[in-house]
Amino acid sequence: MLVLVTLSLIVWSNCGTCHEVYDWDVLLTANKKSDIILKNRLSCIESLNEHLNYTVHMAWEKFKTEFDRNYTDPEEQLERLNAFCQSFLQVRENNVAYREVDWREKGAVTPVRFQGACGSCWSFAAAGAIEGHYYIQERILETLSTQQLVDCSWDYNNRGCKGGSSLNSFRYVKDTGGLELDQDYPYVSDRTNKPNPACGFDQTTWKVLVSGHVMLPFFDEEALLQAVGYYGPVTLSVDTTPVSFRAYQSGIYDDPACGTTLREVDHAMLLVGYGEEEGVPYWLIKNSWGDHWVLLASTLE
């Protein structure tokens, strides 16, 4: 049985500047070795702006999970959080940002798949995120069942081949007992263009259980960059209505006509990294339209 946390982002923005991700191993080591309570220095958290407060709390929860730290006394919890905050800011000040991240190279990304005419992109994005975090935790890369999500998550407002949400998929997997392997519950909707008549989930053969997820702030590329840099693949949604998107072949894709509002995004994909090519920052995206990769330009005015 595996318990894991996945990250979910359901809106896409291609505006803003992103350039900071910090060395998580350094931060964990510093806090694990010192593990001290600093008295009368409880102003660190209060001094943070909204973004840094969010980032520190994400890192703090990861730290507690990583080293099995549970503080039952509220005063001790606050003191240790502030000590962690001070260590975090020190690492942030002195550490160099990762210039690129590619979770494919780390072995956390399964091969690109083909959803067919079924509108099940959301299931591939969700399964891909879970696959990545399963690998990061267990060092085992498995292809998980998207068909289970298509067939079985209707009670969570997913609609099979007519659309759905990665966020709803994470909730479904958490509540209903896990996600099977693709080999045990194979994808067939690419041929039928519809879900199976009934859910075929077998609770005796599930592979991965989701314990929770985090929804990143809307239109915050820095939070997105830190999430994929720190923790692993992240689901997102984009606007695919421009003709240029469907005609994409190679290179960094950039079309100012691409929408960024909740009403305009219409396709879920998996963010697996970022980098820079000839001075142009990009996001590295795994699609579910066959074996190719998309680079989406970022930091564009």
Image: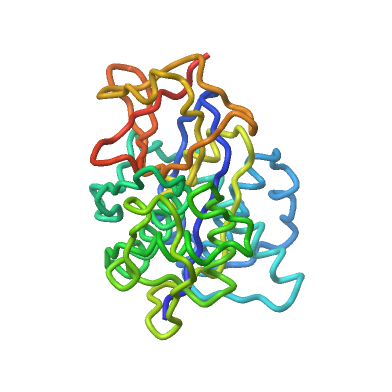
Q: How is the image coloured?
A: rainbow
- In this picture, is 72 found above or below 112? below
Query: Can you give x and y, in whole percent of width and height, for residue 222 in the image?
Result: 53, 35
So how many labels did they put on this image? 0
Query: Can you give x and y, in whole percent of width and height, for residue 122 in the image?
Result: 48, 49
- In this picture, is 31 found above or below 272? below
Residue at 53 percent across and 47 percent down: it is: 162
Residue at 40 percent across and 36 percent down: it is: 97
- 86 or 267: nearer the eye? 267
Locate the N terminus and report the quarter of the image it occupies.
bottom left
Quarter holding residue 255? top left
Q: Residue at the far bottom: name it.
A: 204
Residue at 51 percent across and 15 percent down: it is: 257
- 252 or 31: nearer the eye? 252
Residue at 40 percent across and 50 percent down: it is: 193
Quarter holding residue 214? bottom right
Query: Can you give x and y, in whole percent of width and height, for residue 275 in the image?
Result: 33, 31
Q: Is residue 232 visible?
A: no
Q: Is residue 211 left or right of residue 121?
A: right
- 150 or 174: nearer the eye? 150
Query: Can you give x and y, in whole percent of width and height, for residue 67 in the image?
Result: 48, 72
Q: Is residue 77 visible?
A: yes
Quarter holding residue 272? top left
Q: Is residue 28 left or right of residue 294?
A: right
Q: Is residue 272 left or right of residue 67?
A: left
